Image (spheres, rainbow, N blue to C red):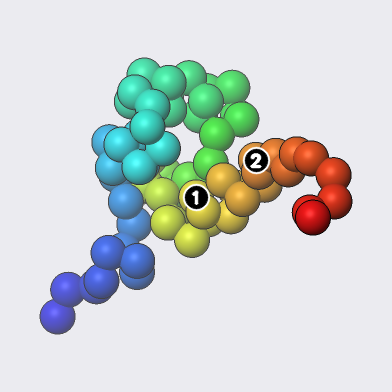
Amino acid sequence: MQPSPTERLAWSSEIAEFLGVSTSTLDDWAYRKIGPPFFKVGGRRRYDMTEVRRWLDDKRVTTGGDAA
């Protein structure tokens, strides 16, 4: 039985597409240690989608004052 997409580790290309950036940008973020956390498996980066979403949530910017 294969793991569901939320249980398996995602490839860099999948995460780049999810975030709407190029794989080169994701590579740069990994090099600069500013992107989502990842695992090194067989010399390649793999991402846990839960961790990617947590990283993305940390980037949330809220604006405005009181809601009317």
Quarter placement of the N terminus: bottom left
Q: Is residue 30 above or below residue 14?
A: above
- Sequence-earlier tag: 2 or 1: 1
Distance in Å between CA atoms under marks 2 and 1? 11 Å
Q: What residue do we see at 85% from left, 44% from top? A: 65
- Looking at the rendered structure, the kind of residue marked 1 is Val
| Left or right, 23 with reference to 48 | left
Q: Is residue 25 above or below residue 40?
A: above
Q: Position of residue 45 (x, y in %)?
A: 38, 40
- Looking at the rendered structure, the kind of residue marked 2 is Lys
Q: Which mark is residue 59?
A: 2
| Left or right, 31 with reference to 46 | right
Q: Secondary structure at mark 2?
A: loop
Q: As drawn, which residue projects farthest toward the bottom?
A: 1
Q: Which residue is mark 1?
A: 52
Q: What residue do we see at 79% from left, 55% from top? A: 68
Considering depth in this image, is 32 or 63 the residue closer to the camera?
63
